[in-house]
Amino acid sequence: GAGKTTLLDVVTGKTQPQVGKVTFNGGVNVLRTSEHRLAQKGIGRKFQTPTVFGSLTVYENLEAAVGFNDGTRKLFSPISAADEERIASTLALTGLTERAFARAGTLAHGEKQWLEIGMLLVQEPKLLLLDEPVAGMTRAERNRTGELLQSIAQRCSILVVEHDMEFVRSYANRVSVLHMGSLLTEGPVAQVQSDPEVIEVYIGRSKEE
C-alpha cells in the first residue's frame, strides 16, 4: 500500500495522476504517452507475472519484441542482421542460448522471467522498470537474476520494486523507501536500513527501543 506499483503505473501511463508530471531523458514529460511510444523513447516495463508468448519459441518471442519497438511494419518483415546479432547477444546475457528454440510455455518460472527481461533488452531501453522480478524464484534463480541485473545496469538504468530485502541488500546500489505514496528516504542500503523513520514505519518501533 505504499504506492510502489502505482508509481510504475504512473510512469508508464497505466494510471493518470490528477496533478504533476513525469519527466524523462532531458526533462521530456512522458505522461499520457502510449506503451508503444514509451518503448520508442527508451522506457521498458516488466510486470511481476511473466507475459511471454507460450506457443512461440524463445527466439520468436525476442523477434516479436524487436518488431514491437520498431513498429508494426517490421513485425511482418524479415529481421536484419543487426537484429539477429542483438537477439543472439541477449540470449547469451540471459543464459537462454541453449533454450532458444524451446517453446516459451515449457520454460521454468525463472527462465520465463529472464526471457521477458530479454524481450525488453532487445528494444534497447534507457530505463528498465521491474516489478518484483524475483517473486516465486528459487534461491539459485534469485542469484542468477541479481547477476543479470548487475550486467544490465552497465548499459541502462534499472528501477526495481522488490520486497525481498536479502535480494535488495545483495544487489541494490541505491534504495528509495515509499510510505503512503510519498518518498520517505533514499540512499545506500545500509543508510536506509538504519534510518529512524524507516525503522519506526516498517518495523513499528523507534530506534531507541
Image: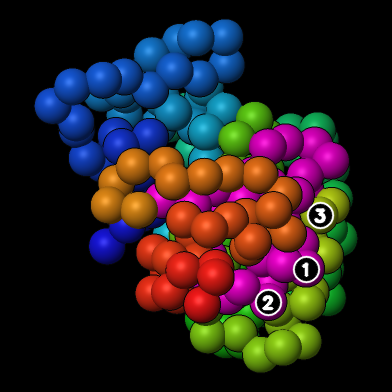
Q: Which mark is residue 150?
A: 3
Can you give x and y, in whole percent of width and height, for residue 49 in the image? Answer: 42, 71
Q: In this rendering, would 23 be left or right of 181?
A: right
In this rendered view, identify the residue nearer to me: 178 or 68.
178
Amino acid at circle 2: Glu
Can you give x and y, in whole percent of width and height, for residue 109 in the image? Answer: 57, 83
Q: Residue 166 carries which label?
A: 2
Query: To which residue does mark 1 refer?
Result: 170
Can you give x and y, in whole percent of width and height, for residue 149 in the image? Answer: 74, 57
Amino acid at circle 1: Ser
Q: Residue 51 carries which label?
A: none
Question: Is residue 156 within the magenta segment?
Answer: yes
Does the residue at mark 1 contact the one at mark 2 (Cβ under 8 Å)?
yes
Can you give x and y, in whole percent of width and height, for residue 117 in the image? Answer: 62, 57
Question: Is residue 119 within the magenta segment?
Answer: no
Answer above or below: position of 100 versus 186. below
Q: How far apart are marks 3 and 2 (CA)?
A: 15 Å
Q: Residues within 10 Å of mark 3 (few under 14, many from 20)?
A: some
Q: In this rendering, would 165 be left or right of 203?
A: right
Q: In this rendering, would 69 be left or right of 169?
A: left
Amino acid at circle 3: Gln
Q: Residue at x 66, y 90 (%)?
A: 138
Q: How crowded is mark 1: few (under 14 residues within 10 Å), some or many (20 or more)?
A: few
Q: Where on the picture, by quarter, is residue 192?
A: bottom right
Magenta part of the protein: which range? 152-178
Tag 1's secondary structure? helix
Tag 2's secondary structure? helix
Answer above or below: position of 63 versus 40. below
